[in-house]
Every structure is written in structure tokens, then in C-alpha cells.
Image: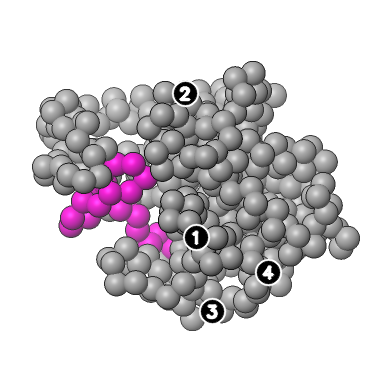
């Protein structure tokens, strides 16, 4: 079967769920508050669509994915792939993926255990099935993508053929070949050789790595699959530690210039529902926590950071006191439902 990166979102009412990150209990609670039965059916015929990143970091990624698969097979749920599913498909063992990758299990258990690990026999089947999921779902009034709606990158998706993993690697190779001609590429190789291990040490700021910053910037903009699932980036004034390594580029507000008629719903960006803190990390969302984004108010991020609940477990904080939430954007109502049962309208600013 030919892989289809862009697929059609069927008509009807949908509940669009943000990044789950293996938080099985939060997902079950949210589904209950939304009125779904255990099998994913809804008395009003509503259906579910997930914005990606169903897995990693949380206590039970296998349960989340197994539930989604049965709902998908029954025609009750859809998803677009996030960067965490892409990492799994291309054998890139990143932070929080020790439930799937044996080589990450010991290191990741420090932060994320106790968690359920995938059975060895399940892994190939799971990867083959996930590899059929799209990167984009769209219809006339609504577009769903994990991180960024970038029409020029979407148009480039079909310039490579084959399965999703093959296309991803082909783009990787094409980008590296292009960047090997950059004047800073030799410095990038040297920086990685000298400081590659230091990038993963959270308690030690690495030395300046300007060529690494240039490589990360270029890769975020030249690789269409990465651009759609991780977003385009910009060089930051000061490195910051996130997702297991020091970062020299940061996410940017691509939605500021989006003004098409169709609404776009994304995840990925770790939005906060609790009051904003002055920590330098909130610049992506200066608007109200329930606001639509961009100059036309057409983009909504439905990721409310439930993937950070591992911090609660480390400190012994129960879920009902967590500031991190799992949310669903109800469409066409444009209202929010959270895993604690609370609801909120969304607003345009």
C-alpha cells in the first residue's frame, strides 16, 4: 500500500486530543468526561483525533497505543504522527523512549519509571502499523498537524517515494549532503566530536557551539517531515536544556503569519494552563491560555503539558493537584475539556 502523508479528515464532530505522552490514566479520565465508552464509541456519534505524541515519558505508552489502535480499527479515532512517533519509526532513541528502546531503558528509568515497557514481540508490529499513519489530516474547515502548518513543506512530501521511514531517511541524507557544502560544516563535525557527550549533561552548560546551532537551524527548515512534526526553529540567545539535551535553537511562532480561512489545530508546544511564570520559556504564548493564535486567530495549540507529569510522580503529587493537563478541543463547539472534568471556552484575541 502506498503511503499517504496527507489524508482527508471526514465530516462530523470531532474531539481533538493533545499530546498524551503515555499518560494512560489521564486519557481514560478525559475520554470519560467527553462521554466516550471504553471502546471509543460515543452516544452522539462523535469521534476522536489525536495530534500525535501518544507515546514516551508517561507510565504506559503501550496501553495508550493499544487502545488507540482498537479505536482506529473500529473507525472511531484518527491521528497524525508527532515527532515522538517519528523517532520510534526511524530508530532514533530519544529522551523518554526507554519503554521501546532497550538502549535507553536504564538511563530513562531515572526520570520516568515506573513504566510499562513494550514486549519485544510487539515492537515490529507496532512500528509497521504506526508507519501507515498520516502527517496531515485536513478538510475544508479544519487542518490537523503535529507542530506546524507549512504549505511549502507539505508540497515537498511527495518528492520522495516509498514508506514513511524511507522518505524520512532520504530527506535526512539530502539535507546532510546540502549542508556538507556549508562553510561551517567542518566546525559542526568538530563540535560534535569534542562536545557531543556534554550536550546531554543537564548540570553543566556546554561551551559555545555556533556551528551546531547553524546545523540545527538548517535541519529544522530543510527537512519537510521534521518541519511539520517538530516545527521550524530559530537560534536562541542562550542554550537551554530540554528533552534530554542542551538546545541551541528554539521554537518560534510560525502561526503569527497564518491567515487562511481553515482552522489549524496543533500539539507539540507544551502550552500551560496554570499562570505564566517569568522563566523565559513562555514567549511562544503571550496570549491567554485559552486563546486562538496568530493574527487571524485561526491556530490553536491543544497540548497542555500532561507529558510533564513525571515530575509530579517524582515529588509525590497526585494527578488531581497537577498543573499539567490533558485536553481535548471539541469541534465544532471550539470548547476545551480537561482530564479533571473542567471545561473552558476558547477565545479569539
Count up the numbered dots: 4
Please indicate, yes or no, whether residue 38 appears anywhere in the rendered image: yes
Which mark's residue is nearer the viewer, 4 or 3? 4
Where is residue 325? Give x, y as percent.
55, 62
Q: Write down the region rendered in magenta.
A: 235-255
Which mark's residue is nearer the viewer, 1 or 2? 1
At horizontal 41% and vertical 43% (from top left) the residue drawn is: 111
Where is residue 113? Give x, y as percent.
48, 39
Between disc 1 and disc 2, whose residue precedes?
2
What is the distance, in whole Å, between disc 4 and disc 1 at their CAs?
A: 18 Å
Which mark's residue is nearer the viewer, 4 or 1? 1
Q: Is residue 17 magenta?
A: no
User: For mark 3, does the 10 Å Cα neighbourhood hold few (<14), some (14 to 19), or many (20 or more) residues?
Assistant: some
Between disc 2 and disc 3, whose residue precedes?
2
Seen in the picture, residue 84 relative to 51 is either above or below; the reply is: above
Where is residue 237? Give x, y as percent.
18, 57
What is the distance, in whole Å, between disc 1 and disc 3 at their CAs?
A: 33 Å
User: For mark 1, does the 10 Å Cα neighbourhood hold few (<14), some (14 to 19), or many (20 or more) residues?
Assistant: few
Residue 64 falls left or right of residue 289: right
Q: Secondary structure at mark 1?
A: loop
Provide the residue designation for mark 1: 317
Seen in the picture, residue 263 relative to 22 is either above or below; the reply is: below
Mark linked to residue 341 = 4
Which mark's residue is nearer the viewer, 2 or 3? 2
Indicate the quadrant where residue 338 lies.
bottom right
Where is residue 190? Give x, y as percent.
13, 27
Q: Secondary structure at mark 3?
A: loop
Tell me whether the residue at label 4 lies in contact with that at label 1, contact meaning CB atoms closer than 8 angstroms. Answer: no
At horizontal 64% and vertical 63% (from top left) the residue drawn is: 339
Provide the residue designation for mark 3: 348
Amino acid at each position: 500500500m502506498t503511503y499517504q502523508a496527507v489524508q482527508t479528515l471526514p465530516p462530523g464532530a470531532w474531539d481533538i486530543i493533545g499530546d498524551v505522552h503515555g499518560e494512560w490514566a489521564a486519557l481514560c479520565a478525559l475520554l470519560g468526561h467527553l462521554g466516550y465508552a471504553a471502546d471509543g464509541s460515543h452516544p452522539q456519534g462523535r469521534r476522536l483525533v489525536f495530534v500525535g505524541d501518544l507515546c514516551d515519558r508517561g507510565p504506559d505508552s503501550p496501553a495508550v497505543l493499544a487502545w488507540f489502535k482498537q479505536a482506529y480499527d473500529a473507525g472511531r479515532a484518527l491521528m497524525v504522527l508527532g515527532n515522538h512517533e517519528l523517532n520510534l519509526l526511524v530508530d532514533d532513541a530519544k529522551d523518554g523512549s526507554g519503554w521501546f528502546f532497550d538502549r535507553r531503558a536504564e538511563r530513562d528509568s531515572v526520570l520516568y519509571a515506573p513504566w510499562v515497557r513494550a514486549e519485544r514481540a510487539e515492537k515490529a508490529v507496532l512500528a509497521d502499523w504506526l508507519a501507515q499513519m498520516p502527517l496531515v489530516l485536513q478538510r475544508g474547515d479544519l487542518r490537523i498537524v503535529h507542530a506546524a502548518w507549512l504549505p511549502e513543506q507539505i508540497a515537498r512530501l511527495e518528492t520522495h517515494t516509498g514508506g514513511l521511514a524511507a522518505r524520512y531517511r532520504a530527506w535526512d541524507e539530502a539535507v546532510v549532503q546540502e549542508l556538507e557544502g556549508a562553510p561551517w560544516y567542518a566546525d559542526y563535525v568538530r563540535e560534535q566530536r569534542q562536545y557531543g557527550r556534554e550536550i546531554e549533561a543537564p548540570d553543566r552548560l556546554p561551551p559555545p557551539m555556533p556551528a551546531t546551532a547553524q546545523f540545527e537551524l538548517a535541519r529544522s527548515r530543510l527537512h519537510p517531515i521534521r518541519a511539520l512534526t517538530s516545527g521550524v526553529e530559530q537560534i536562541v540567545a542562550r542554550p537551554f536544556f530540554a528533552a534530554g539535551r542542551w538546545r541551541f535553537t528554539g521554537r518560534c511562532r510560525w502561526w503569527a503569519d497564518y491567515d487562511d480561512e481553515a482552522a489549524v489545530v496543533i500539539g507539540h508546544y507544551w502550552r500551560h494552563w496554570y499562570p505564566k511564570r517569568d522563566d523565559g520559556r513562555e514567549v511562544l504564548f503571550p496570549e491567554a491560555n485559552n486563546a486562538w493564535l496568530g493574527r487571524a486567530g485561526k491556530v490553536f495549540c491543544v497540548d497542555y503539558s500532561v507529558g510533564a507529569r513525571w515530575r509530579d510522580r517524582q515529588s509525590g503529587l497526585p494527578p488531581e493537584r497537577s498543573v499539567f493537563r490533558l485536553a481535548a478541543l471539541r469541534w465544532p463547539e471550539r470548547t476545551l475539556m480537561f482530564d479533571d472534568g473542567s471545561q473552558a471556552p476558547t477565545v479569539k484575541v
